[in-house]
Image: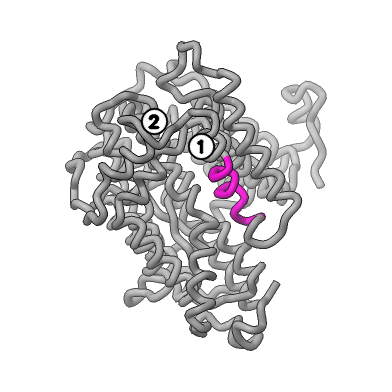
Amino acid sequence: MTDTSIGTPEQLRDPNYTPPMAKAIPLGIQHVLAMFVSNVTPAIIVAGAAGFGFGSGSPDFPELLYLIQMSMLFAGIATLLQTITLGPIGAGLPIVQGTSFAFLPIMIPLVAGKGVDGLAALFTGVIIGGLFHAFIGTFVGKIRFALPPLVTGLVVTMIGLALVKVGIQYAAGGVPAIGTPEYGSLLNWSAALVVIIVTLGLKFFTKGMLSISAVLIGLIVGYIYALITGMISFGGDFGIAASWNNAAVFALPMPFKYGFELSAAAVIGFCLMAFISAIETVGDVSGITKGGAGREATEEEITGATYADGVGSAVAGIFGGFPNTSFSQNVGLIAMTGVMSRHVVTCGAIFLIVCGLIPKVGAVIRTVPIEVLGGGVIVMFGMVVAAGMSMLSDVDWDRRNMVIFAIAISVGLGLQLEPGAVQYLPDTLRILATSGLLPAALIAIVLNLILPTPLDATQTEEISGGMAGKSK
Protein backbone atom coordinates (compact mmCIF):
# COMPACT_ATOMS: atom_id res chain seq x y z
CA MET A 1 0.00 0.00 0.00
CA THR A 2 1.04 3.59 -0.56
CA ASP A 3 2.83 5.13 2.42
CA THR A 4 1.63 8.74 2.51
CA SER A 5 4.21 9.59 5.19
CA ILE A 6 6.80 9.53 2.39
CA GLY A 7 5.06 12.35 0.52
CA THR A 8 1.76 13.65 -0.76
CA PRO A 9 -0.14 11.61 -3.40
CA GLU A 10 0.97 14.12 -6.04
CA GLN A 11 4.61 13.83 -4.98
CA LEU A 12 4.50 10.03 -4.97
CA ARG A 13 3.33 10.02 -8.60
CA ASP A 14 6.16 12.36 -9.65
CA PRO A 15 9.31 10.58 -10.96
CA ASN A 16 11.41 13.64 -10.04
CA TYR A 17 10.33 13.76 -6.39
CA THR A 18 13.02 12.81 -3.85
CA PRO A 19 11.68 11.25 -0.62
CA PRO A 20 13.62 11.66 2.64
CA MET A 21 16.87 9.65 2.36
CA ALA A 22 16.04 7.62 5.46
CA LYS A 23 13.15 6.12 3.49
CA ALA A 24 14.54 6.39 -0.04
CA ILE A 25 17.55 4.16 0.67
CA PRO A 26 15.65 1.16 2.11
CA LEU A 27 13.01 1.51 -0.62
CA GLY A 28 15.78 1.47 -3.24
CA ILE A 29 17.46 -1.59 -1.76
CA GLN A 30 14.02 -3.24 -1.71
CA HIS A 31 13.80 -2.77 -5.50
CA VAL A 32 17.21 -4.40 -5.91
CA LEU A 33 16.50 -7.35 -3.60
CA ALA A 34 13.38 -8.17 -5.61
CA MET A 35 15.58 -8.90 -8.66
CA PHE A 36 18.89 -9.88 -7.04
CA VAL A 37 18.68 -13.64 -7.55
CA SER A 38 17.36 -13.36 -11.10
CA ASN A 39 20.19 -10.98 -11.95
CA VAL A 40 23.11 -13.22 -10.93
CA THR A 41 21.56 -16.55 -11.99
CA PRO A 42 22.42 -16.22 -15.72
CA ALA A 43 26.14 -15.88 -14.88
CA ILE A 44 25.99 -19.11 -12.89
CA ILE A 45 24.12 -20.93 -15.69
CA VAL A 46 26.50 -19.74 -18.43
CA ALA A 47 29.53 -20.79 -16.37
CA GLY A 48 27.93 -24.18 -15.81
CA ALA A 49 27.23 -24.62 -19.53
CA ALA A 50 30.81 -23.60 -20.38
CA GLY A 51 32.18 -26.16 -17.93
CA PHE A 52 33.67 -24.10 -15.11
CA GLY A 53 30.63 -23.69 -12.90
CA PHE A 54 29.57 -25.30 -9.61
CA GLY A 55 30.97 -28.77 -9.00
CA SER A 56 33.03 -28.80 -12.21
CA GLY A 57 36.41 -28.98 -10.49
CA SER A 58 37.68 -26.70 -13.26
CA PRO A 59 40.73 -24.53 -12.51
CA ASP A 60 38.73 -21.72 -14.09
CA PHE A 61 35.99 -21.95 -11.44
CA PRO A 62 37.16 -18.64 -9.83
CA GLU A 63 36.13 -16.89 -13.05
CA LEU A 64 32.55 -17.43 -11.95
CA LEU A 65 33.19 -14.88 -9.20
CA TYR A 66 34.10 -12.26 -11.80
CA LEU A 67 30.99 -12.98 -13.87
CA ILE A 68 28.80 -12.60 -10.76
CA GLN A 69 30.52 -9.30 -9.96
CA MET A 70 29.92 -7.94 -13.44
CA SER A 71 26.26 -8.96 -13.29
CA MET A 72 25.78 -6.80 -10.20
CA LEU A 73 28.01 -3.92 -11.29
CA PHE A 74 26.51 -3.39 -14.74
CA ALA A 75 22.94 -3.96 -13.61
CA GLY A 76 23.60 -1.00 -11.31
CA ILE A 77 25.22 1.11 -14.05
CA ALA A 78 22.43 0.35 -16.54
CA THR A 79 19.86 1.22 -13.88
CA LEU A 80 21.60 4.58 -13.31
CA LEU A 81 21.32 5.26 -17.04
CA GLN A 82 17.56 4.81 -16.74
CA THR A 83 17.09 6.89 -13.60
CA ILE A 84 19.49 9.83 -13.95
CA THR A 85 19.75 9.65 -17.80
CA LEU A 86 22.65 10.66 -20.04
CA GLY A 87 21.38 12.98 -22.75
CA PRO A 88 18.74 11.01 -24.70
CA ILE A 89 19.84 7.76 -23.03
CA GLY A 90 17.47 6.69 -20.27
CA ALA A 91 13.78 7.13 -19.53
CA GLY A 92 14.09 9.24 -16.39
CA LEU A 93 11.84 6.69 -14.66
CA PRO A 94 12.28 4.24 -11.77
CA ILE A 95 13.35 1.35 -14.04
CA VAL A 96 15.53 -1.41 -12.58
CA GLN A 97 17.84 -3.10 -15.11
CA GLY A 98 19.33 -6.56 -14.82
CA THR A 99 20.66 -9.56 -16.74
CA SER A 100 17.89 -11.00 -18.87
CA PHE A 101 16.89 -14.68 -18.93
CA ALA A 102 15.77 -14.08 -22.53
CA PHE A 103 19.33 -14.34 -23.83
CA LEU A 104 20.17 -17.62 -22.06
CA PRO A 105 18.93 -19.90 -24.89
CA ILE A 106 21.35 -18.00 -27.16
CA MET A 107 24.28 -17.94 -24.72
CA ILE A 108 24.18 -21.58 -23.63
CA PRO A 109 24.86 -23.12 -27.11
CA LEU A 110 27.57 -20.50 -27.75
CA VAL A 111 29.68 -21.54 -24.76
CA ALA A 112 28.66 -25.19 -24.28
CA GLY A 113 31.71 -27.17 -23.16
CA LYS A 114 34.17 -24.50 -24.35
CA GLY A 115 35.27 -23.24 -20.93
CA VAL A 116 36.56 -19.70 -20.62
CA ASP A 117 37.61 -19.81 -24.30
CA GLY A 118 33.94 -19.59 -25.28
CA LEU A 119 33.45 -16.24 -23.57
CA ALA A 120 35.31 -14.07 -26.12
CA ALA A 121 32.74 -14.68 -28.87
CA LEU A 122 29.87 -14.40 -26.39
CA PHE A 123 30.86 -10.98 -25.04
CA THR A 124 31.70 -9.67 -28.51
CA GLY A 125 28.15 -10.64 -29.45
CA VAL A 126 26.85 -8.81 -26.36
CA ILE A 127 28.65 -5.61 -27.41
CA ILE A 128 27.41 -5.64 -31.01
CA GLY A 129 23.94 -6.79 -30.01
CA GLY A 130 23.80 -3.99 -27.44
CA LEU A 131 24.68 -1.34 -30.02
CA PHE A 132 22.02 -2.74 -32.34
CA HIS A 133 19.55 -2.73 -29.42
CA ALA A 134 20.24 0.99 -28.91
CA PHE A 135 19.68 1.58 -32.63
CA ILE A 136 16.25 -0.09 -32.31
CA GLY A 137 15.30 2.74 -29.98
CA THR A 138 15.03 5.06 -32.97
CA PHE A 139 12.10 3.08 -34.40
CA VAL A 140 10.91 0.80 -31.60
CA GLY A 141 7.36 2.13 -31.77
CA LYS A 142 7.09 1.16 -35.42
CA ILE A 143 7.91 -2.56 -34.99
CA ARG A 144 5.37 -3.36 -32.30
CA PHE A 145 2.87 -4.46 -34.93
CA ALA A 146 5.14 -7.39 -35.83
CA LEU A 147 5.19 -8.70 -32.27
CA PRO A 148 1.58 -9.22 -31.10
CA PRO A 149 0.77 -11.34 -27.99
CA LEU A 150 0.86 -14.49 -30.13
CA VAL A 151 4.55 -13.91 -30.90
CA THR A 152 5.70 -12.42 -27.59
CA GLY A 153 3.80 -15.03 -25.59
CA LEU A 154 5.32 -17.83 -27.67
CA VAL A 155 8.84 -16.39 -27.25
CA VAL A 156 8.53 -16.03 -23.47
CA THR A 157 7.09 -19.54 -23.19
CA MET A 158 9.98 -20.90 -25.27
CA ILE A 159 12.51 -19.11 -23.04
CA GLY A 160 11.03 -20.86 -20.00
CA LEU A 161 10.85 -24.24 -21.73
CA ALA A 162 14.51 -23.92 -22.75
CA LEU A 163 15.51 -23.40 -19.13
CA VAL A 164 13.34 -25.76 -17.05
CA LYS A 165 15.77 -28.62 -17.75
CA VAL A 166 18.53 -26.55 -16.10
CA GLY A 167 16.48 -26.22 -12.91
CA ILE A 168 15.96 -29.99 -12.62
CA GLN A 169 19.64 -30.70 -13.30
CA TYR A 170 20.71 -28.21 -10.64
CA ALA A 171 18.28 -29.60 -8.07
CA ALA A 172 19.59 -33.12 -8.68
CA GLY A 173 23.22 -32.11 -8.21
CA GLY A 174 24.39 -30.29 -11.32
CA VAL A 175 25.67 -31.41 -14.71
CA PRO A 176 29.12 -32.56 -13.43
CA ALA A 177 27.35 -34.99 -11.06
CA ILE A 178 25.38 -36.74 -13.83
CA GLY A 179 26.28 -40.43 -13.84
CA THR A 180 27.45 -40.47 -10.22
CA PRO A 181 25.59 -42.03 -7.25
CA GLU A 182 25.08 -38.57 -5.75
CA TYR A 183 23.08 -37.29 -8.72
CA GLY A 184 19.41 -37.16 -7.81
CA SER A 185 20.03 -38.22 -4.21
CA LEU A 186 17.45 -37.58 -1.50
CA LEU A 187 19.80 -35.07 0.16
CA ASN A 188 20.16 -33.06 -3.05
CA TRP A 189 16.44 -33.00 -3.71
CA SER A 190 15.64 -32.19 -0.07
CA ALA A 191 17.66 -28.95 -0.31
CA ALA A 192 15.84 -27.95 -3.49
CA LEU A 193 12.45 -28.83 -2.00
CA VAL A 194 13.13 -26.69 1.10
CA VAL A 195 13.67 -23.70 -1.18
CA ILE A 196 10.54 -24.46 -3.22
CA ILE A 197 8.33 -24.95 -0.14
CA VAL A 198 9.54 -21.77 1.58
CA THR A 199 9.15 -19.78 -1.65
CA LEU A 200 5.61 -21.01 -2.24
CA GLY A 201 4.66 -20.42 1.39
CA LEU A 202 5.83 -16.81 1.26
CA LYS A 203 4.26 -16.19 -2.15
CA PHE A 204 0.82 -17.42 -1.10
CA PHE A 205 0.60 -16.64 2.62
CA THR A 206 2.39 -13.29 2.98
CA LYS A 207 2.10 -9.86 1.42
CA GLY A 208 4.35 -6.97 0.51
CA MET A 209 8.11 -7.34 0.39
CA LEU A 210 8.05 -10.82 1.95
CA SER A 211 6.01 -12.06 -0.98
CA ILE A 212 8.02 -10.16 -3.60
CA SER A 213 11.36 -11.44 -2.20
CA ALA A 214 10.09 -15.00 -1.73
CA VAL A 215 12.74 -16.61 -3.95
CA LEU A 216 15.59 -14.73 -2.24
CA ILE A 217 14.34 -15.68 1.23
CA GLY A 218 13.78 -19.26 0.07
CA LEU A 219 17.41 -19.45 -1.05
CA ILE A 220 18.62 -18.08 2.29
CA VAL A 221 16.60 -20.74 4.16
CA GLY A 222 17.93 -23.38 1.76
CA TYR A 223 21.47 -22.17 2.40
CA ILE A 224 20.95 -22.55 6.14
CA TYR A 225 19.56 -26.05 5.55
CA ALA A 226 22.67 -26.92 3.52
CA LEU A 227 24.86 -25.77 6.39
CA ILE A 228 22.90 -27.86 8.90
CA THR A 229 23.06 -31.00 6.73
CA GLY A 230 26.75 -30.61 5.93
CA MET A 231 26.35 -29.88 2.20
CA ILE A 232 28.58 -26.88 2.80
CA SER A 233 30.81 -25.93 5.70
CA PHE A 234 32.63 -22.91 7.06
CA GLY A 235 36.05 -24.60 7.02
CA GLY A 236 38.02 -26.55 4.43
CA ASP A 237 39.56 -25.59 1.10
CA PHE A 238 36.14 -25.08 -0.49
CA GLY A 239 34.25 -23.75 2.53
CA ILE A 240 32.67 -20.39 3.14
CA ALA A 241 35.67 -19.02 5.04
CA ALA A 242 38.11 -19.98 2.27
CA SER A 243 35.93 -18.40 -0.40
CA TRP A 244 35.59 -15.23 1.67
CA ASN A 245 39.31 -14.98 2.50
CA ASN A 246 40.45 -15.62 -1.08
CA ALA A 247 38.27 -12.84 -2.49
CA ALA A 248 39.55 -9.28 -2.68
CA VAL A 249 37.92 -6.46 -0.76
CA PHE A 250 37.78 -4.24 -3.83
CA ALA A 251 38.33 -4.85 -7.54
CA LEU A 252 37.73 -2.90 -10.73
CA PRO A 253 36.42 -4.52 -13.92
CA MET A 254 38.84 -5.32 -16.75
CA PRO A 255 38.01 -4.30 -20.34
CA PHE A 256 38.10 -7.21 -22.80
CA LYS A 257 39.19 -9.59 -20.06
CA TYR A 258 38.21 -12.57 -22.22
CA GLY A 259 39.33 -11.13 -25.56
CA PHE A 260 37.45 -10.15 -28.70
CA GLU A 261 36.22 -12.71 -31.22
CA LEU A 262 33.68 -12.17 -33.97
CA SER A 263 31.17 -15.01 -34.23
CA ALA A 264 28.34 -14.82 -36.75
CA ALA A 265 26.13 -16.97 -34.51
CA ALA A 266 26.70 -14.68 -31.53
CA VAL A 267 26.15 -11.46 -33.47
CA ILE A 268 23.03 -12.68 -35.26
CA GLY A 269 21.61 -14.28 -32.12
CA PHE A 270 22.04 -11.23 -29.89
CA CYS A 271 20.78 -8.82 -32.57
CA LEU A 272 17.64 -10.86 -33.18
CA MET A 273 16.96 -11.18 -29.45
CA ALA A 274 17.36 -7.41 -29.13
CA PHE A 275 14.00 -7.01 -30.90
CA ILE A 276 12.27 -9.17 -28.29
CA SER A 277 14.02 -7.44 -25.40
CA ALA A 278 13.12 -4.00 -26.80
CA ILE A 279 9.43 -4.87 -26.95
CA GLU A 280 9.62 -6.22 -23.38
CA THR A 281 11.08 -2.90 -22.26
CA VAL A 282 8.25 -0.98 -23.97
CA GLY A 283 5.78 -3.07 -21.98
CA ASP A 284 7.63 -2.48 -18.71
CA VAL A 285 7.85 1.28 -19.24
CA SER A 286 4.13 1.42 -20.00
CA GLY A 287 3.38 -0.68 -16.90
CA ILE A 288 5.46 1.60 -14.66
CA THR A 289 3.85 4.84 -15.85
CA LYS A 290 0.35 3.35 -15.64
CA GLY A 291 0.85 1.73 -12.23
CA GLY A 292 2.87 4.53 -10.64
CA ALA A 293 1.67 7.72 -12.30
CA GLY A 294 -1.67 6.75 -13.84
CA ARG A 295 -0.68 7.84 -17.34
CA GLU A 296 0.65 6.48 -20.63
CA ALA A 297 4.39 6.45 -21.29
CA THR A 298 5.64 9.18 -23.61
CA GLU A 299 7.52 8.43 -26.83
CA GLU A 300 10.65 10.05 -25.33
CA GLU A 301 10.49 7.76 -22.29
CA ILE A 302 10.10 4.62 -24.43
CA THR A 303 12.92 5.66 -26.78
CA GLY A 304 15.22 6.65 -23.91
CA ALA A 305 14.56 3.38 -22.08
CA THR A 306 15.45 1.37 -25.19
CA TYR A 307 18.63 3.41 -25.70
CA ALA A 308 19.61 2.66 -22.08
CA ASP A 309 18.94 -1.06 -22.60
CA GLY A 310 21.30 -1.16 -25.57
CA VAL A 311 24.05 1.12 -24.29
CA GLY A 312 24.01 -0.61 -20.89
CA SER A 313 24.36 -4.00 -22.57
CA ALA A 314 27.16 -2.86 -24.90
CA VAL A 315 29.21 -1.35 -22.05
CA ALA A 316 28.62 -4.46 -19.94
CA GLY A 317 29.90 -6.68 -22.76
CA ILE A 318 33.19 -4.76 -22.89
CA PHE A 319 33.92 -5.70 -19.28
CA GLY A 320 32.46 -9.23 -19.20
CA GLY A 321 28.87 -8.44 -18.26
CA PHE A 322 25.73 -9.93 -19.81
CA PRO A 323 22.90 -8.17 -21.72
CA ASN A 324 20.73 -5.97 -19.55
CA THR A 325 17.03 -5.26 -19.83
CA SER A 326 14.28 -3.81 -17.66
CA PHE A 327 13.05 -6.10 -14.89
CA SER A 328 9.33 -6.73 -14.80
CA GLN A 329 9.35 -7.45 -11.04
CA ASN A 330 9.91 -3.74 -10.61
CA VAL A 331 6.56 -2.90 -12.22
CA GLY A 332 4.60 -4.76 -9.56
CA LEU A 333 6.72 -3.32 -6.77
CA ILE A 334 6.03 0.27 -7.87
CA ALA A 335 2.32 -0.46 -8.08
CA MET A 336 2.48 -1.93 -4.55
CA THR A 337 4.48 0.88 -2.88
CA GLY A 338 2.94 3.69 -4.91
CA VAL A 339 6.33 5.43 -4.97
CA MET A 340 7.21 6.58 -8.49
CA SER A 341 10.44 8.40 -7.57
CA ARG A 342 13.35 7.56 -9.87
CA HIS A 343 15.73 8.73 -7.14
CA VAL A 344 14.60 5.83 -4.95
CA VAL A 345 15.77 3.38 -7.63
CA THR A 346 18.99 5.38 -7.98
CA CYS A 347 19.76 4.43 -4.37
CA GLY A 348 19.23 0.79 -5.29
CA ALA A 349 21.50 1.17 -8.32
CA ILE A 350 24.30 2.55 -6.17
CA PHE A 351 23.88 -0.42 -3.80
CA LEU A 352 24.28 -2.80 -6.77
CA ILE A 353 27.38 -0.98 -8.00
CA VAL A 354 28.98 -1.17 -4.56
CA CYS A 355 28.24 -4.91 -4.40
CA GLY A 356 29.75 -5.35 -7.87
CA LEU A 357 33.01 -3.68 -6.81
CA ILE A 358 33.39 -5.90 -3.73
CA PRO A 359 34.33 -9.45 -4.79
CA LYS A 360 33.60 -10.77 -1.31
CA VAL A 361 29.87 -10.37 -2.04
CA GLY A 362 30.21 -12.59 -5.09
CA ALA A 363 32.39 -14.99 -3.08
CA VAL A 364 29.51 -15.64 -0.69
CA ILE A 365 27.04 -16.12 -3.58
CA ARG A 366 29.50 -18.60 -5.11
CA THR A 367 29.23 -20.85 -2.04
CA VAL A 368 25.48 -21.41 -2.51
CA PRO A 369 25.11 -25.15 -3.25
CA ILE A 370 23.93 -25.91 -6.76
CA GLU A 371 21.01 -27.93 -5.33
CA VAL A 372 19.78 -24.92 -3.35
CA LEU A 373 19.99 -22.72 -6.42
CA GLY A 374 18.14 -25.45 -8.32
CA GLY A 375 15.11 -25.04 -6.06
CA GLY A 376 15.06 -21.32 -6.80
CA VAL A 377 15.46 -21.60 -10.56
CA ILE A 378 12.77 -24.29 -10.81
CA VAL A 379 10.36 -21.68 -9.48
CA MET A 380 11.78 -18.81 -11.56
CA PHE A 381 11.92 -20.65 -14.87
CA GLY A 382 8.51 -22.16 -14.29
CA MET A 383 7.21 -18.64 -13.77
CA VAL A 384 8.73 -17.61 -17.10
CA VAL A 385 6.67 -20.34 -18.78
CA ALA A 386 3.59 -19.22 -16.85
CA ALA A 387 4.19 -15.59 -17.86
CA GLY A 388 4.31 -16.66 -21.50
CA MET A 389 1.07 -18.58 -21.14
CA SER A 390 -0.50 -15.53 -19.53
CA MET A 391 0.45 -13.47 -22.58
CA LEU A 392 -0.98 -16.16 -24.83
CA SER A 393 -4.29 -15.91 -22.97
CA ASP A 394 -4.77 -12.54 -24.70
CA VAL A 395 -4.64 -14.22 -28.11
CA ASP A 396 -7.85 -14.78 -30.06
CA TRP A 397 -7.37 -18.51 -30.66
CA ASP A 398 -8.91 -18.75 -34.09
CA ARG A 399 -7.65 -21.52 -36.34
CA ARG A 400 -5.15 -19.25 -38.09
CA ASN A 401 -3.37 -18.45 -34.82
CA MET A 402 -3.48 -22.11 -33.77
CA VAL A 403 -1.68 -23.17 -36.95
CA ILE A 404 0.97 -20.45 -36.54
CA PHE A 405 1.56 -21.44 -32.92
CA ALA A 406 1.59 -25.14 -33.77
CA ILE A 407 4.26 -24.88 -36.46
CA ALA A 408 6.43 -22.43 -34.52
CA ILE A 409 6.49 -24.40 -31.27
CA SER A 410 6.86 -27.77 -33.05
CA VAL A 411 9.97 -26.65 -34.92
CA GLY A 412 11.44 -24.55 -32.09
CA LEU A 413 10.91 -27.00 -29.25
CA GLY A 414 11.75 -29.97 -31.49
CA LEU A 415 15.16 -28.55 -32.46
CA GLN A 416 15.84 -27.71 -28.85
CA LEU A 417 15.09 -31.26 -27.72
CA GLU A 418 16.91 -32.97 -30.60
CA PRO A 419 19.89 -30.78 -31.63
CA GLY A 420 21.50 -33.68 -33.50
CA ALA A 421 18.83 -33.33 -36.19
CA VAL A 422 20.71 -30.35 -37.64
CA GLN A 423 24.27 -31.58 -37.09
CA TYR A 424 25.17 -31.02 -40.77
CA LEU A 425 24.26 -27.35 -40.78
CA PRO A 426 27.14 -24.83 -40.70
CA ASP A 427 28.17 -24.00 -37.13
CA THR A 428 26.50 -20.58 -37.17
CA LEU A 429 23.13 -21.88 -38.33
CA ARG A 430 23.34 -24.93 -36.06
CA ILE A 431 23.87 -22.82 -32.93
CA LEU A 432 21.02 -20.48 -33.87
CA ALA A 433 18.69 -23.38 -34.78
CA THR A 434 19.33 -25.44 -31.64
CA SER A 435 18.50 -22.47 -29.43
CA GLY A 436 14.91 -23.31 -30.41
CA LEU A 437 13.92 -19.78 -29.48
CA LEU A 438 15.02 -18.02 -32.64
CA PRO A 439 13.46 -20.50 -35.10
CA ALA A 440 10.17 -20.38 -33.18
CA ALA A 441 10.18 -16.57 -33.06
CA LEU A 442 11.05 -16.14 -36.74
CA ILE A 443 8.45 -18.66 -37.88
CA ALA A 444 5.76 -17.01 -35.76
CA ILE A 445 6.66 -13.48 -36.93
CA VAL A 446 6.81 -14.40 -40.63
CA LEU A 447 3.64 -16.50 -40.64
CA ASN A 448 1.77 -13.84 -38.67
CA LEU A 449 2.70 -11.29 -41.33
CA ILE A 450 1.99 -13.41 -44.43
CA LEU A 451 -1.09 -15.39 -43.38
CA PRO A 452 -3.78 -12.70 -43.09
CA THR A 453 -6.85 -14.83 -43.83
CA PRO A 454 -8.48 -16.76 -40.95
CA LEU A 455 -8.82 -20.48 -41.59
CA ASP A 456 -12.12 -22.25 -41.20
CA ALA A 457 -12.78 -25.57 -39.47
CA THR A 458 -12.57 -27.64 -42.65
CA GLN A 459 -9.03 -26.42 -43.24
CA THR A 460 -7.66 -27.50 -39.86
CA GLU A 461 -9.79 -30.42 -38.69
CA GLU A 462 -7.79 -33.00 -40.60
CA ILE A 463 -4.53 -32.03 -38.83
CA SER A 464 -5.85 -31.46 -35.33
CA GLY A 465 -7.08 -34.95 -34.46
CA GLY A 466 -10.52 -33.70 -33.54
CA MET A 467 -9.06 -31.09 -31.19
CA ALA A 468 -9.29 -27.98 -33.33
CA GLY A 469 -10.15 -25.83 -30.33
CA LYS A 470 -12.32 -22.77 -30.18
CA SER A 471 -11.63 -19.08 -30.38
CA LYS A 472 -12.83 -16.67 -27.70
Label 2 sits on what residue type? Phe
Front one among 269 and 313: 313
Which residue shows up at 74% across the image and 30% down it? 459
Instruction: Look at the image and tell me whether residue 81 can be seen.
Output: yes
Tell me which colouring the rendered structure shows: one colour
Residue 63 locus on image (x, y percent): 27, 38
**Residue 216 drawn in magenta:** yes
Classify residue 358 as left or right of residue 159.
left
Vertical placement of residue 106 versus 217, above or below: above
Which residue shows up at 52% across the image and 80% down it? 15
Residue 47 locus on image (x, y percent): 35, 34
Front one among 418 and 68: 68
Q: Quadrant of residue 406?
A: top right
Q: Secondary structure at mark 1?
A: helix
Label 2 packing within 10 angstroms: few (<14), some (14-19), many (20+): many
- The residue carrying mark 2 is 54
Instruction: Look at the image and tell me whether residue 156 can be seen.
Output: no
Q: Secondary structure at mark 2?
A: loop
Front one among 282 and 219: 219
Q: Magenta stretch: give its range.
A: 211-221
Image quarter in which the N terminus is found: bottom right
Residue 36 locus on image (x, y percent): 48, 53
**Residue 373: mark in rendering:** 1
Q: CA distance from mark 2 to mark 1?
A: 10 Å
Which residue shows up at 49% across the image and 65% down it? 29
Label 1 sits on what residue type? Leu
Q: Is the C-beta separation of discs 2 and 1 under 8 Å?
A: yes
**Residue 325 drawn in magenta:** no
Q: Main secondary structure of the magenta part?
A: helix
Classify residue 403 as left or right of residue 61.
right
